[in-house]
Every structure is written in C-alpha cells, then in structure tokens.
Image (tube, rainbow, N blue to C red):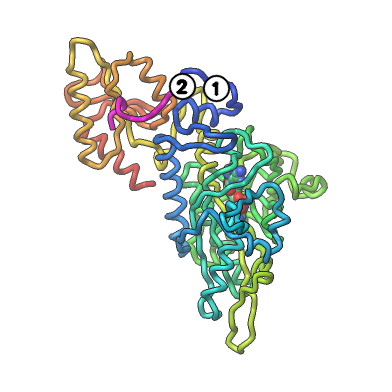
Amino acid sequence: MYLSKLFIPLLKETPSEAKIKSHQLMLRAGMVKQSSTGIYSWLPLGFKIMKKIEQIVREEQNKIGAQELLMPTIQSAEIWKESGRYDEYGEEMLRIKDRQGKEMLYGPTNEELITEIFRSSVKSYKSLPQLLYHIQWKFRDELRPRFGVMRCKEFFMKDAYSFDLNDDEAKKSYNKMFFAYLNTFKRLGLTAIPMEADTGPIGGDLSHEFVILAETGESQIYSDKRIFDIDINKHDNSDGSIKELRKKYDEFYAVTDDKFKKEDFEKKVKKENQLITKGIEVGHIFYFGDKYSKPLDCSVDLQDGKKVNVKMGSYGIGVSRLVGAIIEAKFNNNIMKWPFSVSPFDIAIIPSLQKNDKSNYLKAEKVYKFLVKNKIDVLFDDTNEHLSAKFKKFDLIGIPYQIILGSKSTEDKFEFKEINGKTENLSSEEIKNKLLNKRNFN
Ligand code: P5A
C-alpha cells in the first residue's frame, strides 16, 4: 500500500476530549472517529488492527474445539422475559420496538439467545459437551462511556458459551477456556492475569476477569506478584495438565475490587509480594450452572430417561477494547510499537526523497515490489515530506519495522530498523526472511 493512497486522517494536535493515551493515539492516528457519544466508526487503520486481533481470538477458540456461529445483534424481548433479565438489566439495555410493536432489544450479551438455540435443537446427553461462540457487536447504554473504545456503548465482543452435563464436566470447559484466554493474550503481546471477580448481571458463583496492568485501567486489583511468573507453556493441553496449571493460579491471591478482603490479602500475601494497582479488563469468564437453562427449560435426556438442565458458562473477550488496551500497554514516550501479530502492516519503507533525485524512490519501490511479491504487507511512504516529519507520523502508526532509505543505505543493503530496537544493514532477501520467520513464530 502506498501511503499517499491510504485513508488515514492523521491529526497534528491531541484532541482535548481524549484523556488517556490510547484514546489520544487512536484519534491522532486516524484509527477511529466518534459518530456519537460512545459510538465509533472504525477507519481503515483501526479496523485492520481490530480484524487481526479478532482472527487471533478466533484461532485460539477453534484450537479448543469451540465452533463459530453468528447470532444477530437484535434480539426479541421474549427470551429475556423468560430468564427474568429483561427487567433486571435496567437502563443499560437499548430497547426498541418493530413496526408491529413487538418488543426487541439490541443485544448486550447472548446467554438467552444461545440457550434458546440450544434447547430447540439438542435433546440428548450424547450431544454434550458443546462449545459455541460468535464475534459480534454488542450494545450497552453505558451511563458514562469514556476513554474511547475502552468503555463505549457499541463494542465488538467474542462471546462463547459452554454446555455440559454436570458440574465436573462444566469446570473442565471453564478451565479449557481459561487457558485459551491466556494463550490468546500472549499472542497479542499482553500479560493478562486471571483475577477472581464478581459476576454482576451475568450471574453465577465462579468467575475470573483477565486483567492487564495499566494505570488508566478501571479495575482495581490486589494480587500476589508471583502470579506473573507462572509459565503458561507448561501444559500439554490434556485435562490433567490444564487442571494442574489452573491450580497454580489458584495458589496465588489475585482478586478484583469486589472480591477484596483486607484480612485475607494480608494473611495470604507477604508484604514484599503484595501488588495493589489498576488494570484493564480484557476478558471475563463465568460459570453459572443452570441459571439460564432452568428458566428457559433447556434440558437433555439422560441414559435412564430422566431429564437434566444443561450446565452452562459464558466467556467474553473485548475485541474492540483490546485495541485500546494494547496501546495502553505499548505506547510509550510518544512512540507506538504494535506487536507484530496485530500490526497494521508488517513493515514500512521510508525513503528520503530529494527534489531532483529519484534514486531513493526507485530503490524503495524496487524493495517494495519485491516484498509485496513475497506476501509481506508493506506500507510505502511515497509522500514528499521531510524525513523527520515522516518519522513523527510513523511513531503514531506504530509499524514495528522500518526500512529507511537515506544516506546509510547502499545499492543492495538497506537500513532495517526495529522500533525501540537495533538497526542493521540488510538486503531485501534478508529482510523478507526475517519477517517471514517472525510471522511463523506468531
Ligand atoms: C461473557 C460473554 C459478558 O458479557 N456474556 C457473554 C459475558 N461478560 S462481560 O464481562 O460483561 O463482557 C465481556 C468483555 O467485553 C468487554 N466489554 C466492553 N468493551 C468496551 N466497552 C464496554 N462498554 C464493554 N463492556 C464489556 C470487556 O473486555 C469484558 O471483559
């Protein structure tokens, strides 16, 4: 892609309404545009990043055998009346009527709808367990939407739902998801820590928030620092080893505000290991047994002919929030560096262009064509701006690798720079191999 063709409305000044760095960067780099309070349009740069995050989330769900479907954004009020949440949900739910006067709503979550789908098609215990998910827009009429895409009204969520025969089986599904989440966040370049949390309007008695540390986060957390040192690679995906690893997480105190008890914290965590800080909730998982299957009458036949309500859990990841969360974690000293796995482009080519001398441009274009031919996604800065102005722009766009064609490059070796890292002189072949290796690693 040529930068001159990219729809990227960069802003020179930081808009005053943006209070945290992710919101500032997203507006300045032309990633999103607010269309009304808490509702955003996603512009090409922001959209591309969000789609990459979505894909990683999807791959990790598929890896544990979850199956993707797509439910609508608009739901009928009926099923919410059956579960009892229609009144409970209060003003956060956007309620609408169709032309027949039928009560509808814009889904804030999908426990009811998935239960309704399940009950109408699954009748036997033989069809369990089952894990279903979709990635879809949600709407919550938040009282105080703020911080850009972090707390907004319309947001993109991956929500999965598990169906099991009994509590033991259901806990296995919960643990599977627990580790799928750790793997997902790791691939996104984040360290997300599971913290015991309150279940709020979703319900149930077992729940973990996945939190990344950030001063601007809205979750207050209390934890034992050592939980950050757990090596998540030490399991082989078998139920047994996952259970073991899960136990390790349980050994260390880590809770959000509403679960915090001062006496417990001080008793269980030595002073030097105590960590009290803020974090961003990027995911939240719940086990709630038959909270929905009972009122909605979702049951399966057992071998002996008896019926049992299925045991359910639900598992959310804030896909659009993650765009902001990654920025909060990675944007430092006015320089953004996207993790390679979600970067909007693999590499930027930045030539220094002199008026009557096309040599750098031609050299750059040759490297560009070579990389594109090799399936590398390149942003080629073909604008006439001064190098220093170009660098400022790329500090916002955040592509982790740059090829700079200036005084230091020769005929076949170019300045290859990793943002906040080292600079080397490499040939286009070497650059291609480096990036392809990087991609395989991700
Ligand atoms: C779990 C999946 C649920 O809704 N039902 C289906 C359960 N959980 S949750 O914690 O309420 O939301 C899941 C994740 O969605 C993100 N999120 C938001 N992102 C942006 N703006 C919002 N207003 C918002 N609300 C929730 C969070 O990442 C949360 O963990």
Category of crowding for the residue at label 2, using alpha-carbon neighbours closer than 10 angstroms: few (below 14), some (14–19), many (at least 20): some
Q: For the N terminus, which image quadrant?
A: top left
Residue segment shown in magenta? 1-10
**Visible residue check, residue 229:** no
Which residue is labeled 1 in the image? 15
Q: Nearer the viewer, residue 299 or 415?
A: 299
Residue at x 33%, y 30% (from the top left corner): 6
Q: Indicate left or right for 352 with 77 as reference.
A: left
Residue at x 21%, y 21% (from the top left corner): 361
Q: Measured from the top left, where is residue 55 in percent x and y?
A: 42, 50
Which residue is labeled 2 in the image? 11
Distance between mark 2 and mark 1 Cα atoms = 8 Å
Q: From this view, report whether residue 23 is shown above or below residue 283.
A: above
Q: Measured from the top left, where is residue 12 in percent x and y?
A: 46, 18
Q: Give the residue type that dot 1 points to.
A: Pro
Q: Nearer the viewer, residue 57 or 203?
A: 203
Residue at x 71%, y 38% (from the top left corner): 276
Q: Which type of secondary structure does the marked residue at label 2 adopt?
A: loop
Q: Give the residue type that dot 2 points to.
A: Leu
> CB of mark 2 within 8 Å of CB of mark 1?
yes
Figure quadrant of residue 364: top left
Taking the magenta stretch, the answer to whether it contains residue 9 is yes
Q: Indicate left or right for 192 with 278 as reference.
A: left
Cβ(mark 2) to ligand 1 < 8 Å? no
Taking the magenta stretch, the answer to whether it contains residue 274 is no
